[in-house]
Amino acid sequence: MAATKYNARDVIFQMLDPVGGTYVQINGLNTFTRGTDMKETDLTTFASQGNEESEIMQRGKNMKLQGFRLKDPATGALDPGQLLVETLADQVGDASIGTFRFAAPGDANYVVWQATAAMGDEGGGDNDKVSWSVTLKRTGASGTAVRP
């Protein structure tokens, strides 16, 4: 079968609850962006004759998840997935690393990241719903897990 386009809305994003040991869906999302980082070292010498020379020494990955902040109007409770992410984003040291997994439609496996979380701006205007966003920065290599 030929490769085909798929809907961004069908990509699944989950975070592992470190207390309960189960993955929790991060809801309220309407945009995601996956990116890369790299660090390179300059190898240019006089013999390079004015041409830059370099090598990649380190590669990293990041992902920004954006959407709407979800809150139960009766209890004030946040969406469980958003709450896990926000809790992680307040941590430091070893506690600042969480486990995330994501998969596109048709993927047999999840991509699994150990990652840190940095919350983005939250807000909105007169006719807006409140926004929610987080940037995840992978630490270490990506892993995989079989999708049930």
Image: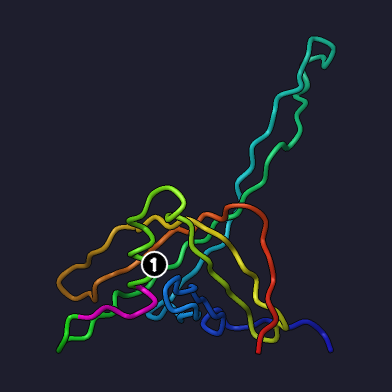
70 horizontally vs 24: left or right: left
Residue 35, image x, y percentages = 58, 56
Image quarter where the N terminus lies is bottom right
Residue bearing the label numbered 1: 85
- Residue at x-position 82% and y-position 14%: 49
Of residue 138 and residue 17, the one placed in the foreground of this image is 17
For residue 103, what is the image quadrant? bottom right
Vertical comparison of 139 with 45: above or below: below
- Residue at x-position 52% and y-position 64%: 33
For residue 34, what is the image quadrant? bottom right
Amino acid on which disc 1 is placed: Val
Residue 108, image x, y percentages = 73, 83
Residue 2, image x, y percentages = 82, 85
- Residue at x-position 60% and y-position 54%: 61
Q: Rate crowding at label 1 as few (under 14), some (14 to 19) or many (20 or more) other CA atoms within 10 Å.
A: many
Vertical comparison of 52 with 83: above or below: above
Q: Residue furthest top?
A: 46
Vertical comparison of 134 with 80: above or below: above
Can residue 79 be found in the magenta stretch?
A: yes
Q: How many marks?
A: 1
135 horizontally vs 48: left or right: left
Residue 119, image x, y percentages = 35, 58
Magenta residues, start to end = 77-82
Of residue 46 and residue 72, the one placed in the foreground of this image is 72
2 horizontally vs 106: left or right: right
- Residue at x-position 68% and y-position 65%: 143
126 horizontally vs 18: left or right: left
